[in-house]
Amino acid sequence: MATSQDVDYSVRDHTAWLAMNRPGVLNALSKGMFRGLELALASASSDPAVHSIVIRGEGRAFSAGLDVKEVSGFATQKEARDFVYRLVKPFWERFFECEK
């Protein structure tokens, strides 16, 4: 898997390393971050050479949590719901279903 803007992905010694890469905002979880993490988890989960997965944050914080600036800009309740069902939910489903 290629590295995305918000998530760096590498494999070393049978371990997939997923690094949240938004240190300027303490790795706040944005749309791009959720998308990048879900894709990286999918890649690591399906790679038989990967035996374990480590998720970490660049900089001084693992993650500040949800990017409040980004989500406070939703114009409608439907837009907020779409964010949850199209990005947040798929990431957490992939996370909890991962056997590594």
Image (cartoon, rainbow, N blue to C red):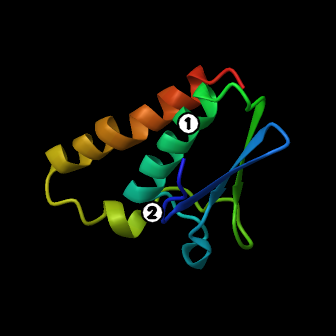
Q: Circle 1 — which element?
A: helix
Q: Residue at x 63, y 35 (%)?
A: 44
Looking at the picture, how far across and down is residue 94, in whole percent? 52, 29
| Residue nearest the observer in this picture, 62 or 8 | 8
Task: Pick whichever, 55 or 45, lies toward us.
Answer: 45
Q: For mark 2, does the 10 Å Cα neighbourhood hold few (<14), some (14 to 19), or many (20 or more) residues?
A: some
Residue furthest bottom in the image: 24
Q: Nearer the viewer, residue 39 or 58?
A: 39
Residue occupying image coordinates x 62% and y 73%:
23
- Observer-nearest of 58 and 5: 5
Q: Which mark is residue 43?
A: 1
Structural crowding at the residue carrying mark 1, measured as other residues with C-alpha within 10 Å and reported as few (<14), some (14–19) or many (≥20): some
At which x and y percent is residue 22?
A: 56, 70
Residue 98 at x, y = what percent?
62, 24
Please name the residue that numbered disc 2 is placed on: 67
Q: Tell me which residue sits at (81%, 36%) in the image.
A: 14
First along the sequence among labels 1 and 2: 1
Q: Residue at x 48, y 51 (%)?
A: 36
Please name which of the two marks, 1 or 2, marks the residue nearer to the observer.
1
Dot 2 amino acid type: Asp
Is 52 located above or below residue 99 in the figure? below
Tag 2 secondary structure: loop
Q: Is residue 85 above or below residue 31?
A: above
What is the number of the mark on residue 19?
none
C-alpha gap between disc 1 and disc 2? 24 Å
Q: Where is residue 39 shown, x and y percent of the image? A: 48, 42
In the rendered view, tell whether residue 52 sits above or below residue 9: above
Say which amino acid is labelled 1. Ser
Q: Is residue 21 left or right of residue 73?
A: right
